[in-house]
């Protein structure tokens, strides 16, 4: 039952996605370097390390991985 | 009217010629770009008031091989010194603790939070990632990473596959990672819940050493982490995109912090002994992350929300935003705000009561207790000639640990058992 609901939900959300979006020639703004998901990757990596070490949860934006996280 | 039309036409022609010029400039840049190296480097200082101080240097090199392949290599070196909370509670009397190595002791003044001041470490981390575009709609990547510090070694492999749909407006990505960690603590691994041996309780150094060795186990311990992430990125409009991730992480092995202890107190809140903590050896974590990012006329903005939950019952909510404003084509300012709130792990105990049976697991590490944290950051960036960029970042980070409903007995009510931690983060970055 749950699986059916999840499958329907995924199918509906994917079909909803197909009506979203822009034409390839309308991607000028999205193609800006500052719009890349990793445009500030060093800041993000340093932040991930701080919060991984100082808080009880990690990951979410990208894979959490292993590591010490001591102190 | 005609005049106005003419002016519009001439404007349109001017814009069109500019955009053509722009395109030709971009095209010539693109023909040179694929073999170019891209280097990002940063140095960061992290300093807590009276506690941990860290300096972290990071370098990232990217090399494109044609349009299909991209090699990304990263090297991180960091050095940490200073004190960190041991887990013991503050007392009205001076407290004496044995150092983790067993060699020597340190004292904590009355009313102060016990901090282990022996902490000092240098870590080197390296990673390499290869991304390959297989077809207009399929991409893949594989990577390896390793890190080494005095008492810790970590080695990981990761890989992922990406498929785009709907004229490249929708991207589905699936990635996974496996990490193997090995820990060999200073002075050996403490026996779970063994009582800290104190030099003052023994007549001779030999007797003390024998007692200390009884609290330790030789050899290293392992930890294995399996991560999986499913991600959907969707273009919403000409200026906005949206990303949703689900992450699953299964960790097994040694997750106890060998340097953390718990105070065992009597009915008056006075410490009777210090016990080494013990955490479960498995953890299953789920994360849900949503982010939207928008291209503004004179800036960029993003908002994200993350919810995490796991079988330690440690749940968290994170809200975060970055807003960048371009003062000119070359200079920008950026604000960063982050709010984080977590609910304590089910085995978190700020202290243990003497005379009561010991729980199966317990830790007084405030980082897995109830806590709220805030980050407020400012960043300024400057684009230099030749595509170089320099940026400066200054952030304030505050942790507010909270009592999740434990009755404070006797003298414990007189002390701040959940002190705030305040930190400054300063960073300089350079890209070329």
Image (cartoon, coloured by chain):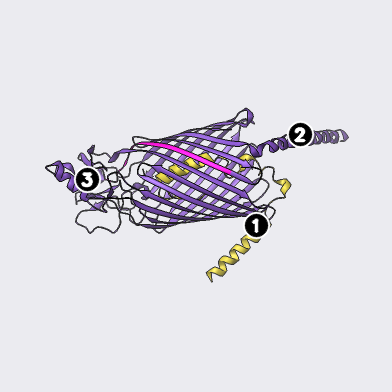
Secondary structure under badge 1? helix
Secondary structure under badge 3? helix
Label number found at residue B250: none
Question: In yellow, which chain?
Answer: A
Mark 1 highlights which residue? A17
- Is residue B78 in the magenta section? yes
Counting other residues with Cα less than 10 Å from the Cα at mark 2, is it few (<14), some (14-19), or many (20 or more)?
A: few
In the picture as drawn, the residue positioned furthest to the left comes out as: B203
Mark 2 highlights which residue? B21
Residue placed at 58% from the left, 42% from the top?
Answer: B301
Q: State the image coordinates of residue B135 (x, y, percent, origin top left).
A: 67, 53
Residues at marks 2 and 1 touching, judged by CB atoms closer than 8 Å: no
Q: Locate residue B36 relative to residue B223 in the image: left or right.
A: right
Q: Is residue B356 above or below residue A34?
A: below
Label 3 marks a residue whose chain is B
**Image quarter of residue A34:** top right
Q: State the image coordinates of residue B205 (x, y, percent, origin top left).
A: 15, 41
Label number found at residue B411: 3
| Picture colour for chain B | purple
Q: Locate residue B300 relative to residue B350 in the image: left or right.
A: right
Identify the image quadrant of the N terminus of chain B.
top right
- Mark 2 or 1, closer to the camera: 2
Residue range (magenta): B71-91
Residues marked 2 and 1, same chain: no
């Amino acid at each position: 039952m749950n699986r059916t609901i999840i499958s329907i939900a995924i199918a509906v959300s994917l079909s909803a996605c197909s009506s979203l979006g822009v034409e390839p020639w309308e991607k000028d703004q999205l193609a800006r370097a500052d719009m890349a998901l990793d445009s500030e990757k060093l800041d993000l990596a340093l932040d991930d390390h701080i919060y991984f070490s100082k808080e009880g949860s990690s990951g979410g934006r990208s894979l959490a991985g292993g590591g010490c996280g001591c102190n | 009217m005609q005049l106005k039309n003419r002016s519009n036409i001439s404007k349109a022609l001017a814009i069109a010629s500019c955009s053509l010029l722009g395109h030709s400039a971009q095209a010539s840049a693109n023909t040179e770009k694929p073999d170019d190296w891209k280097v990002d480097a940063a140095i960061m200082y992290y300093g807590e008031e009276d506690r941990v101080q860290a300096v972290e240097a990071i370098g990232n090199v990217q090399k494109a091989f044609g349009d299909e392949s991209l090699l990304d290599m990263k090297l991180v070196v960091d050095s940490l010194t200073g004190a960190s909370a041991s887990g013991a509670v503050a007392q009205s009397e001076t407290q004496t603790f044995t150092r983790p190595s067993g060699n020597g002791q340190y004292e904590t003044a009355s009313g102060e939070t016990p901090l282990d001041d022996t902490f000092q470490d240098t870590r080197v981390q390296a990673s390499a990632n290869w991304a390959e575009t297989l077809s207009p709609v399929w991409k893949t990547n594989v990577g390896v990473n390793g890190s080494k510090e005095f008492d810790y070694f970590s080695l990981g492999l990761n890989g992922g596959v990406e498929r785009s749909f709907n004229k490249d407006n929708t991207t589905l990505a699936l990635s996974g990672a496996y990490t193997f960690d090995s820990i060999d603590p200073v002075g050996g691994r403490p026996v779970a819940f063994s009582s800290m041996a104190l030099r003052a309780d023994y007549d001779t150094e030999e007797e003390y050493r024998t007692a200390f060795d009884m609290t330790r186990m030789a050899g290293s311990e392992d930890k294995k982490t399996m991560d999986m992430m499913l991600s959907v990125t969707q273009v919403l409009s000409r200026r906005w995109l949206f990303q949703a991730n689900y992450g699953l992480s299964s960790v097994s092995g040694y997750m106890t912090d060998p340097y953390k202890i718990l105070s065992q107190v009597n009915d008056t809140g006075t410490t009777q002994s210090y016990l080494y903590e013990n955490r479960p050896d498995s953890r299953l974590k789920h994360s849900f992350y949503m982010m939207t990012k928008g291209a503004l006329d004179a800036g960029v903005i993003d908002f994200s929300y993350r919810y995490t939950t796991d079988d330690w019952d440690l749940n968290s909510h994170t809200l975060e935003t970055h807003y960048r404003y371009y003062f000119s084509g070359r200079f920008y300012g950026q604000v960063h705000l982050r709010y984080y709130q977590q609910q304590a792990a089910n085995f978190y105990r700020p202290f243990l009561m003497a005379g009561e049976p010991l729980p199966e697991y317990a830790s007084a590490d405030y980082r897995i207790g109830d806590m709220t944290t805030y980050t407020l950051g400012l960043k300024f960036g400057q684009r230099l000639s030749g595509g170089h960029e320099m940026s400066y970042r200054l952030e304030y980070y505050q942790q507010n640990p909270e009592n999740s409903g434990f009755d404070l007995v006797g003298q414990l009510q007189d002390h701040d058992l959940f002190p705030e931690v305040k930190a400054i983060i300063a960073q300089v970055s350079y890209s070329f």
